[in-house]
Amino acid sequence: MSCHGCARSFGFLTKEYGCEKCGFSFCSKCLVKKICKSCFVKQSAVVPPPVVSQEKNGKVDTPHQNQVTQIPPVVLEQKLEKLENPNKSPIVVYTEDSRMTNLKKGLSFEDQQLVNRLSKLKSEIREMKGDIPSQSEIEERLAKLKGIDPEVYRKPAAIYVKPKTNNVDDATDLINQIREEVAIDRQSDLPSATPANQSEETDDVEMLLQNEAQAIQADAQLALEGLKKDREIQERLNKLRVDRGTRKPEAKEDKSSDEDSEDEDKQAARIINRVLDEDRLELEDEGICDEGVAAGQEELPWCELCNGDAHLRCFDCDGDLYCRRCWKEIHKDADLKHHRTENYKAPKK
């Protein structure tokens, strides 16, 4: 900001003062008695009252020395046109907003800067409004970008107007619609109930058939394995008989038929025992232990729970050994009280 009279910039040494008459900012030199020089001249240039002469005719005499003649603006324009300066630049008169000038009155320097910035923003907004394209121009640009006719955007939008109907017609339409929906629901529900039940029954039957088929297959496999073992035993017996007949044909002729039959029975018993031993080993490898296998193992004379001395053997609990206290604790239920037991004595070493 600068002084309106001498154009001196305001600072720490030159303070800013406002004219109470015109509202412009001035320095202390240009401002006289809170009024600028131009306002002071206008205020002091007052026409003096007319002086009445003391003559009888009552003529009014105005002093020429204090008289101020005002030139009309038309005469001033004519004089300016007669001046010899054809390339003169046009005079531009900037009118300030009276509202902004009124806002600046009595404000500090910072507040006046804010007012100036506000007025500048308003002027920029006004200039920008002239550069904003119209709606038709925007529609044309958008149509060019999409490659379509701009008349598409200019057509009025389709508005759906609900037809005017009576309340009675609306009620009948609603009743008919509800009836149709109920009929459709009945048609869709009735046939769907029976297939669901049928499908459940068929699923149960299929499950039973599958379980039976699996059980039959398991039994058939076990039977086939038994037949295979029997065939192997028969083949081994036949081989032994053939070998025995080829090796010692002369020595066997002297022996009686009873001795031959006894030897064959013993040999068959040995083969059967050998096959049983092999089966037992296979079962032990698979984790299966029957009563015969368990009997062949060394049994420890301890309770299954507390590792104390065993006193009872429970046949219904796979022959496990228990002390009396542990057996009573386990067999408290009514179903377990009827288990068969016998007294057990540890074998002497």
Image: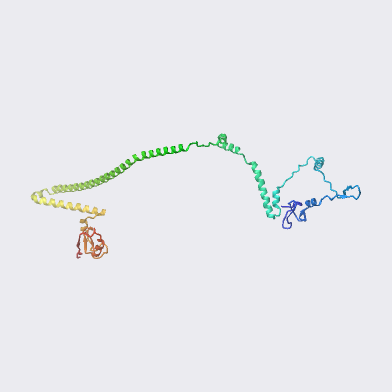
Residue situated in front as seen by the camera: 288 or 229: 288
Q: Residue at x 68, y 54 (%)?
A: 111
Q: Residue furthest right?
A: 55
The residue under the point 21% across, 63% down is: 312
Which is more toward the observer, 81 or 185? 185
Q: In front here: 232 or 70?
A: 70
- Residue 127 at what x, y percent from top left? 66, 43
The percent position of residue 83, horizontal first and vertical second, equals: 82, 41
Colour scheme in use: rainbow
Q: Which corner quadrant holds the C terminus?
A: bottom left
Q: Residue at x 66, y 46 (%)?
A: 124
Question: In the picture provided, is 153 more to the left or to the right than 330?
Answer: right
Whole-percent x, y for residue 26 in the image: 75, 53
Q: Position of residue 310 (x, y in %)?
A: 23, 64
Asked whether, in this view, residue 67 is left or right of residue 323, the answer is: right
Q: Across the whole image, how many numbered discs are drawn on residues?
A: 0
Left or right, 285 with reference to 110: left
